[in-house]
Image (tube, helix red, strand yellow):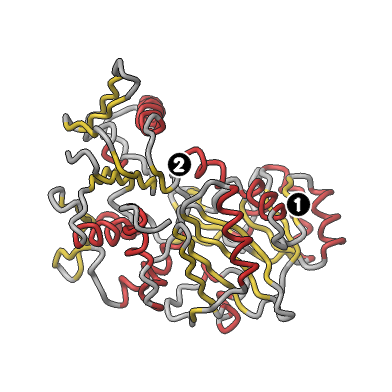
Amino acid sequence: MTAMLPNRPFIMLFATPIARGGGHDTLRYDEERQLSQILVSGVWLDAAMAHGPAVRDSRFTRVRQETTDDE
Amino acid sequence: MNESAILIVSTVADTATDTVVQSLIARRVAHQRINTEDFPFERALTLDYQAEGQTSIAIGGSTVKQTRSIWYRRVRSPAKPERMDPGIYDFCLRENRAALLGGLLTQSTRWMSHPAAVWRAEFKPYQLRIAQEVGLRIPKTIVSNDPDAIRRAFRDFGPLIVKPTRSGHFHQAGEEFSIFTSRVTVEHLAELDAAKWAPSIYQEWISKRYDIRVTCVGSRVFAAAIHSQTDPAAAVDWRQTVNAGLPHSPIELPAPLVEQLQRLLRRLDLAFGCLDLVLTPDNEYVFLEVNPSGQWLWLDDQLNFGISDTVAEWLTGGVA
């Protein structure tokens, strides 16, 4: 539970800090194949094909971002 | 571009999109992916209103003439260009959104799902009403920023949870935060006057045998039990745990419940939806919410559901 500040909605009592940016700085896009790639141990891999504990974790925690529009 | 291609509206950051694109490549199905964060600073967009009643969309000089289906998956804003004034940046984003989404709305095709349906369904207070109308049990609920009404709910509903009305994601002082579904205890009531700053959803706490995640792709239904009560960090909201090994298992839902869930999606005009439910210790199913553009990759990983392939199949017309 976070400390309450003035003019801060009640629900923000329950806010949890999360890692910034979701690792987007390690993303790039292969225009021709229309596929994203992520940097894993210095190697660019297709995001859909990358495996390993970190990828598995991010696929699970990605469920936290389910709204269609980031507006 | 091929006249019967599939148009995918998404972002470079959505891996679920990549898995569907790979499935389309494997099927040799023509498709065009647009990453919405490319607009307007990296890529040009032109809508051209033609005499014959069609509106063509040109992206980077290439015309999207006709689509067999459009997957409206994600919209993500571009980063602010260096030295651009924040007010001008906001103006550019608003104008871009009106042009890009307005152009998409002109297209008559098969949608997963139509943007207007997605926007409407993302209003949780609305979807709860429709869920009730199709016969699903929902928790006793108020949506309010009135501290007195919330105190009454605390008295009348028994143990309460609070969750965001829209999205629990926000920034403060350079940090990023999420708000998950949380238990409201008597100790929190002293702070309740601050509820006036933003309405939230307050619901009776539903005891769980386990959580359920149902992913619907057209008529196909993939149901998973999420054994949230095995992990204290997942007990109230399973999204809160970082334990990717949280146990899951495939389950069969009763046919009448499946019919209710499909009726809900039809009422919301959604071709795709991720539905969250709870199974109580008394074996009663309680609907919590539906996400019109939810995630599923971890379910394909853990349970081998094949949801990505099913989305690709739907987009090609192979799933009703």
Q: Nearer the viewer, residue B180 or B49?
A: B49
Q: Nearer the viewer, residue B75 or B240?
A: B75
Please tell me whether mark 1 sits on a helix, a strand or a loop: strand
Chain name for mark 1: B
Amino acid bearing label 1? Ile
Q: Which residue is mark 1?
A: B142
Q: Nearer the viewer, residue B84 or B160?
A: B160
What residue appears at the point 46 percent right and 40 percent down from the top-left corner?
Answer: B115
What residue appears at the point 47 percent right and 69 percent down from the top-left corner?
Answer: B222
Q: Mark 1 or mark 2: which comes first in sequence? A: 2
Q: Position of residue B203 (x, y in %)?
A: 73, 60
Q: Nearer the viewer, residue B54 or B86?
A: B54
Q: Position of residue B102 (x, y in %)?
A: 40, 29
In the image, B173: left or right of B101?
Answer: right
Please tell me whether mark 2 sits on a helix, a strand or a loop: loop
- Say which quarter of the image contains residue B311: bottom left
Q: Position of residue B123 (x, y in %)?
A: 60, 45
Residue B284: mark in rendering: none
